[in-house]
Image: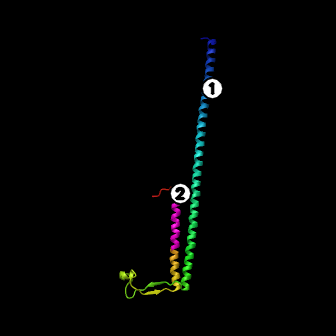
Amino acid sequence: MTATTWRPLAAVLLCGTIAGWTAQGWRKDASIAALQRTAAIQAATAAKQLAQATARVLTLERAAGAALAQRADHLTQEQIHAKTERDRFNADVRSGAVRLSIPVASGQCAATADSTAAAGHRHETRAELDAATAAALDAIAGDGDDATRQLNACIDAYNTVRNTYHVQTE
């Protein structure tokens, strides 16, 4: 082959190579663009799902917060009512309108008293408590009642949060 034969062949090969590279570049660019579109769609979908999940959690938090605030208000009202009742009871004890007494075992151990006395079929001897002792006993009982109310409110709050967020406990 002569140089004149090679030149057109080399030019054709060179043009074919350039055309091939160009076509390959276009295909590569198209593949990259498709991957970028897919990634953008997936990112947008993930962002939308995250926004929806965040909105659900915020709604749950608001509902739980409102329920907890309502339970706290209820506890406050219960405590105010109980204190009012205790104050009224103590005032009645101090004024003598209410008298407190305890049974007195005469010569027997209270634990071995017969069942008819425990059932109230017999008249039993009783000792009246003075106002200070009655108030002290009422304060002890009131503190216990307050603690019970607070613990019940705590349990209610726990259950509210557990049920709001559907938490599984062991």
Segment colored magenta: 145-163
What kind of secondary structure does the magenta stretch mostly adopt? helix
In terms of secondary structure, where does tag 2 sit?
helix
Q: How far across and how far down the image is residue 82, in percent?
A: 55, 74
Q: How far across and how far down the image is residue 62, in percent?
A: 59, 57
- 148 in magenta: yes
Residue found at the very far front of the displayed protein = 121
Between marks 1 and 2, how big is the CA–CA gap? Answer: 60 Å
Disc 2 residue type? Thr
**Residue at the location (51% across, 86% down)?**
130
- 155 in magenta: yes
Q: How far across and how far down the image is residue 50, in percent?
A: 58, 48
| Residue assigned mark 2 | 164
Residue in the foreground of this view, choosing between 25 and 2: 25
**Residue at the location (55% across, 82% down)?**
92
| Residue assigned mark 1 | 22
